């Protein structure tokens, strides 16, 4: 009888200890919150998504914003991201191939358009079409966009200009910005007469205007995939569920993104 009681007491003690440990771990995760590594073009929408999610769940969201290429390399080097939100498929593939993403957690959330922009007071008028006179519109100035060798917006711009037959004429006049928001800033400050950014970035900056949108068939589709990293916890999963749910879709639409059906 005494041995049976002792075993029962030990079992209950173990259960209590395990439950307490799980609760402490869960509380620690709540305190840590969710760290999102997001493409620079998601700056404004991620701010709103984070605020809305925190208001609903009381889980804090922090964002680290840069070019998708830079973020992917940082995650590969051990940066403690819970969520990766890329501006193209290539850098998501890069992490997936290195088994740094949770299997099955990857989703394409929204799409975007590529825009030619100018300072808001610019008199430039230009219709984007095969062989269009981009060089003439630049005059002696430069064309600001992301680095075509690594930054997604720059790669999309390169593909579009190549398809339209004007890349060779302007390739030597490119300002190779480190991310799309840097390219946007060059034009907003008047340091470049024209730039190529995403439509949503242009809408977020009052100091620029859209000259024209690039034809969608002139470049690969601009898609934004999201995925959990291998270190992500339950809170990160809840954030991704929020982003891909109806509340998240409404926020994306407000910022000019096209929601993937």
Image (cartoon, helix red, strand yellow):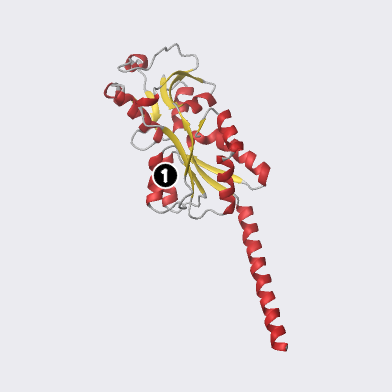
Quarter location, residue 116: top left
Residue 73 at x, y = what percent? 40, 47
Residue 112 at x, y = what percent? 46, 30
Residue 45 at x, y = what percent? 56, 34
Question: In the orientation shown, which residue stands out farthest toward the left?
Answer: 168
Determine whether 119 is above or below 20 in the image: above
The residue sitting at 42% across, 43% down in the picture is 70
Q: Write down the residue under mark 1.
A: 92
Determine whether 240 is above or below 48 in the image: below
Question: In the orientation shown, which residue stands out farthest toward the front?
Answer: 261
Quarter location, residue 243: top right
Determine whether 74 is above or below 18 in the image: above
How many numbered marks, from 0 up? 1
The residue sitting at 62% across, 58% down in the picture is 28
The residue sitting at 39% across, 22% down in the picture is 215
Q: Quadrant of the N terminus?
A: bottom right
Q: Residues within 10 Å of mark 1 (few under 14, many from 20)?
A: many
Residue 124 at x, y = what percent? 42, 12
Q: In the depicted view, which residue is nearer to us: 56 or 120?
A: 56
170 horizontally vs 96: left or right: left
Q: In the depicted view, which residue is nearer to us: 152 or 246?
A: 246
- For label 1, the SS is helix
């Amino acid at each position: 009888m005494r041995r049976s009681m002792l075993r029962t007491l030990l079992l209950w003690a173990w259960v209590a200890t395990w439950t307490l440990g799980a609760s402490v771990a869960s509380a620690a995760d709540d305190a840590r919150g969710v760290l999102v590594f997001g493409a620079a073009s998601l700056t404004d929408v991620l701010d709103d998504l984070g605020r809305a999610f925190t208001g609903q769940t009381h889980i804090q969201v922090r964002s680290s914003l840069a070019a998708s290429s830079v973020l992917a390399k940082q995650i590969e080097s051990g940066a403690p991201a819970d969520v990766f939100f890329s501006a193209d498929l290539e850098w998501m593939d890069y992490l997936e191939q290195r088994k740094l993403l949770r299997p099955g957690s990857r989703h394409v959330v929204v799409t975007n358009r590529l825009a030619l922009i100018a300072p808001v007071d610019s008199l430039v008028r230009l219709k984007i079409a095969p062989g269009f006179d981009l060089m003439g519109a630049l005059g002696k100035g430069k064309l600001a966009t992301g680095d075509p060798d690594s930054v997604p917006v720059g790669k999309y711009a390169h593909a579009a200009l190549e398809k339209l037959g004007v890349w060779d004429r302007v390739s030597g006049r490119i300002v190779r910005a480190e991310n799309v928001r840097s390219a946007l800033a060059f034009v907003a400050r008047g340091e470049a007469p024209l730039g190529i950014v995403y439509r949503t970035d242009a809408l977020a900056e009052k100091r620029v205007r859209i000259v024209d949108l690039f034809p969608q068939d002139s470049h690969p589709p601009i898609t934004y995939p999201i995925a959990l990293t291998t270190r992500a916890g339950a809170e990160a999963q809840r954030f991704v569920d929020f982003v891909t749910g109806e509340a998240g879709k409404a926020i994306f639409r407000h910022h000019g993104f096209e929601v993937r059906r």
